[in-house]
Image (cartoon, rainbow, N blue to C red):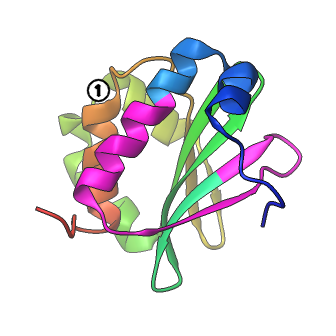
Amino acid sequence: MLDKIPNAEEMTALVGQSLYEVWNELCILIDEKYDMERQWNKGGKAWTYEYKYRRGGKTLCALYARENCIGFMIIFGKNERAKFETERDNYSEQVQKIYDEAQTYHDGKWVMFEPTDTSMFHDLMKLLSIKRKPNRK
């Protein structure tokens, strides 16, 4: 857990104005579809902050922030990977490439996207629905 949650000014100073807008747009999209607990953490070695969406002890996804960069991670378990594989042609080449290059660990495939604009958002929301069906109308 973080001692102090970063405010809008601190986030803008860290990632830059345009990426902070992308971050906010993504959070709005997720919040519209999912009723989740949200948790700020330290970002580990590679990131300054982690902002995690969880419910019932399970993580839906996490957003990450560091200097001039934001990240969006989804971890796919075995069944979720199989579902993506059957639907992969419905995703952009960029999303397929990032998925294919992601590292697979014992607990799943850790797929990290680094969006610089909103162009991948449609695909990202489809990927989230593989993890969990939206629970908001």
Q: What x and y, as percent, mark residue 115?
A: 50, 25
Left or right of residue 32, residue 16 in this image: right
For the N terminus, give its image quadrant: bottom right
Mark 1, other Cα within 10 Å: few <14 / some 14–19 / many ≥20: few
81 inside magenta stretch: no
In the image, taking residue 82 as reference, residue 16 lies left or right, namely right
Determine the residue positioned at 83% across, 40% down: 46
Using the rendered image of the protein, determine whether residue 121 is visible from the camera's viewpoint: yes
Residue at screen point 36% across, 66% down: 80
Residue 16 position by quadrant: top right
Residue 46 counted in the magenta span: yes
Residue 18, given in percent of the width and then of the height, sits at 52, 13
**Who is closer to the viewer here, 93 or 46?**
46
Q: Which quadrant is the C terminus positioned in?
A: bottom left
Q: Residue furthest left?
A: 137
Give me the residue at 79% from left, 40% from top.
Answer: 47
